[in-house]
Image (cartoon, rainbow, N blue to C red):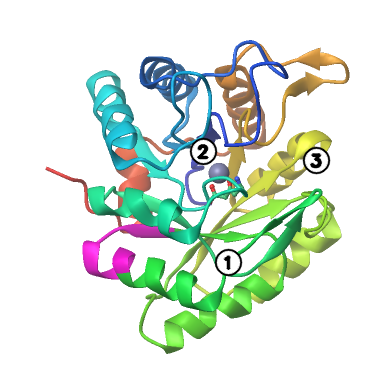
Amino acid sequence: MEKLIITAALDGAEVTRAQHPALPVTPEELAVAAQEAAEAGASIVHVHARYADGTPTQDAAVYEEIIARIAERSDVIVQVSTGGAVTMTADERGQVLSLRPEMATLTTGTVNFGRDVFLNRPDDIERFAEKMRDGGIKPEIEVFDVGMIAGALRLVKAGLLTLPLHFDFVMGVPGGIPGEIEHLMHLIRSIPQGCTWTVAGIGRAQLPLATAGILLGGHVRVGLEDNLYYSKGRLAKSNAEFVERVARLAAELGRELATPAEARAMLGISPRQ
Ligand code: KMH
Ligand code: ZN
């Protein structure tokens, strides 16, 4: 089997310090968290920018500082979010693409998101995809429900995305596809041959789906964006603690971990100079 790519989703946009006192939010905190996650075996970090008070932002200048600080400490791939927060407009969310990051998320449909709506209009999705294509930015297709795979394949037909795609199955968001193995099997069967996938289980779905990702030849995303608890009632100490657990499971199950350089080669990412 291919080497395992672990993504650490360090902070998200909706999680707060009140919910988790160790949530990294400043560029320096995010850089330290990225380094720790990379040392534990992550080859990608998925990052949301925040202002110092923890408010989520898509301000390119804040992302620029985060990316630079992470690069000082590690060669981990920095994947920025175009999802931002549910309160943001698409114009706000897309600002970060002006930096031409190595990798960015692209959600190819709309989904209820708890009591909110994560709105992704076709025009906005296409605009983001075009910018990624023209900027040489590797998209990760965020799949919150199965119809989003068809949405991505329509963009391939339109020439805005290129196969093989890399998908992230985000499973267990209230409003999206439930975090169950039978649904994961259906998602895997629904993507074209040659594409790669990772799985991000939300909340208590994180551990079983991460294990399934390792066993089924996919990749794994863990981190405080998706889950605050290491086990029932016990907050995770850090993002790295989640990555360490996946690394241990992978070793037991015979999957070697991909380094950032190997992950770049596997995903067809051109490193920035
Ligand atoms: N914060 C969510 C509404 C992404 O990063 O692209 C969207 C999200 C997905 O987190
Ligand atoms: Zn995110």
- Residue 58 appears in the picture as rendered: yes
Q: Is residue 10 above or below residue 143?
A: above
Residue lying farthest to the left in this orientation:
273
Residue underneath mark 3: 205
Q: Which residues are magenta?
A: 131-139
Residue underneath mark 1: 120
On the image, the x and y values in percent for residue 145 come to 72, 65
* Distance CA(mark 2)–CA(mark 1): 23 Å
| SS at circle 2 | strand
In the image, taking residue 179 as reference, residue 104 lies left or right, namely left
| SS at circle 3 | helix
Mark 3 or mark 1: whose residue is earlier in sequence: 1
- Residue drawn at point x = 46 percent, y = 47 percent: 81
In the image, taking residue 265 as reference, residue 179 lies left or right, namely right
109 or 233, which lies in front? 109
Which mark is on residue 7?
Answer: 2
